[in-house]
Image: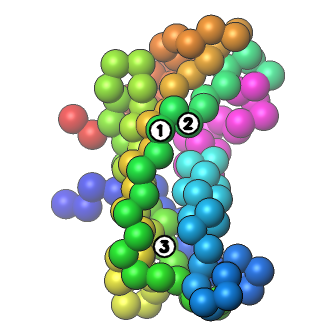
């Protein structure tokens, strides 16, 4: 059974590459963030809606292991699954080059919620994510 609960397909743009002709490491964080935002939209909420309700999910820690570099024009699948640990939601996000499905990046993104200016649990996220949580 596939552990991933969400996937989006993206393409590397020329300006995301460095002098070596590979994606600059900082751009992988953009790919990961875009994937999480799209996942939220698929779950029925947007960052703008959350902020308007006083709920601001923020990254507390990120770990990235670079495996196979992506190059300009490469298409890739950005996949995720998540777990809840205390008040944190931990996103396990991996990027696979297409079409050969070679692992490009393995990452863990720990997020927390600031609700009305205070670090706390988010009942809204608990409800939205209940069907996606991996035990």
Q: Which mark is residue 77?
A: 3
Q: Which mark is residue 61?
A: 1
Q: Residue at x 56, y 13 (%)?
A: 119
Left or right: residue 21 versus residue 94 is right
Mark 2 secondary-structure assignment = strand
Q: In this picture, which residue range is highlighted in magenta? A: 38-51
Query: What distance separates the C-alpha of mark 3 from that of mark 1?
Result: 22 Å
Binning the other alpha carbons within 10 Å of mark 1 as few (below 14), some (14 to 19) or many (20 upward) gives few
Query: What distance separates the C-alpha of mark 2 from that of mark 3?
Result: 22 Å
> On the image, which quarter does residue 65 sit in?
bottom left
Front residue of 68 and 132: 68
124 versus 24 height, above or below: above
Asked if disc 1 and disc 2 are in contact, CB closer than 8 Å, the reply is yes
Tell me, yes or no, whether the highlighted magenta stretch contains residue 90.
no
> On the image, which quarter does residue 8 sit in?
bottom right
The answer to whether residue 5 is seen in the rendering is no
Residue on which the image places disc 2: 59
59 versus 50 height, above or below: below
Binning the other alpha carbons within 10 Å of mark 2 as few (below 14), some (14 to 19) or many (20 upward) gives some
Image location (x, y in percent) of residue 78 = 49, 66
Left or right: residue 19 versus residue 36 is right
Query: What distance separates the C-alpha of mark 1 from that of mark 2?
Result: 6 Å
Mark 1 secondary-structure assignment = strand
Q: Residue at x 41, y 19 (%)?
A: 87
Which image quadrant: the N terminus? bottom left
Q: Nearer the viewer, mark 3 or mark 1?
A: 1
């Amino acid at each position: 059974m596939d552990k991933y609960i969400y996937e989006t397909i993206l393409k590397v743009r020329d300006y995301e590459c460095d002098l070596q002709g590979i994606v600059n490491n900082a751009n992988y964080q953009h790919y990961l963030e875009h994937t999480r935002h799209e996942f939220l939209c698929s779950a029925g909420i947007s960052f703008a809606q959350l902020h308007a309700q006083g709920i601001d999910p923020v990254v507390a820690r990120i770990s990235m292991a670079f495996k196979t570099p992506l190059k300009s024009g490469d298409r890739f699948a950005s996949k995720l699954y998540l777990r809840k640990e205390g008040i944190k939601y931990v996103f396990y996000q991996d990027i696979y080059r297409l079409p050969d499905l070679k692992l490009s990046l393995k990452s863990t993104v720990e997020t927390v919620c600031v609700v009305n200016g205070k670090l706390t649990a988010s009942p809204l996220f608990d409800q939205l994510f209940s069907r996606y949580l991996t035990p």
